Amino acid sequence: MEKTEKSDLVLAWLNDALAMENALAAVLQHRIKDAEGFPAIEEMDRRHLTETLEHADRVKRCIARFGSKPSTVKSMFGTIFGAMQAPMTGLAKDEVIKNCLVDHAAEQFEVASYTALIAAANEIGDTETAEICEQNRREDEAMAARIIAGIPAVVAAHLGSIEKFPAGRAASGEMMGQPVAPAPTSDAAMTGGQD
Ligand SMILES: [Fe+2]
Ligand SMILES: [Fe+2]
């Protein structure tokens, strides 16, 4: 790859994309922990994590084709997405829903980033980078659509759980037909005998 000002820009954006994917992978590790006891959510998060790590690998391969190593400079993108990691606090109020909204926004951000990269890569005639970014973009689009499609069920499960558990113990595991996680013994007194 001939080094020009434009190719430097594509390389810088690839490093931004890598920082973004790495930061999202870290967020997903937290999401998986948050989903403990809720197998359907956990499985979706694990699948998303696998996909995100694959995206990072593909971007690394693009960077290598520029004869470069991934940048270790802290990227703004890594910082933005790092802020998404806020763990679920308390006994799951509406965090499950908020996580969906944030995760959807993150996927759309990825789609926009890869769209910019594809245009720039094509501009410098690097069709291989363009194709790889296209593949990542397609999967991020599909993930965004999956997240959106799941929101009504998550909301319904949350609202249903408010009725069942007035103390605000949102049974997020009810979404996608999962059984409710066993109540912690400490609040068994709150829910026991009230149904
Ligand atoms: Fe991605
Ligand atoms: Fe993604």
Image: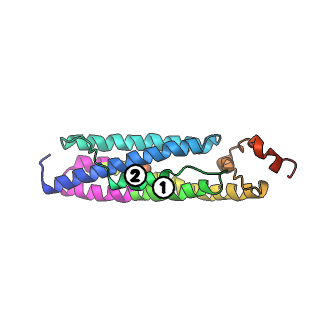
Report which quarter residue 119 is drawn in.
bottom left
Residue 150 pos. (x, y %):
58, 54
Question: The N terminus appears in which quarter of the rendering?
Answer: top left
Badge 1 residue CB within 8 Å of ligand 2: yes
**179 left or right of 68 in image:** right
> In the rendered structure, which disc, 1 or 2, sits on the residue that comes first in sequence?
2
Report which quarter residue 184 is drawn in.
top right
Question: Closer to the camera: disc 1 or disc 2?
Answer: 1
Element type at mark 2: helix
Q: Is residue 85 magenta?
A: no
Viewer-proximal residue among 40 and 81: 81
Residue 43 pos. (x, y %):
56, 41
- The residues tagged by marks 1 and 2 sit, at their Cα atoms, a distance apart of 10 Å
Badge 2 residue CB within 8 Å of ligand 1: no
- The image shows residue 119, relative to residue 37, as above or below, that is below
Query: Which residue does the numbered mark 1 point to in the structure image?
Result: 144
Viewer-proximal residue among 124 and 110: 110
Residue plotted at (81% across, 50% down)? 190
The magenta-colored residue range is: 110-132
Residue 138 got which mark?
Answer: 2
- The image shows residue 171, relative to residue 119, as above or below, that is above
Residue plotted at (45% across, 54% down)? 83
Label 1 is placed on what type of residue? Ala
Residue 100 pos. (x, y %):
55, 55
Residue 61 got which mark?
Answer: none
Viewer-proximal residue among 74 and 145: 74
Q: Residues within 10 Å of mark 2 (few under 14, many from 20)?
A: few
Q: Is residue 115 magenta?
A: yes
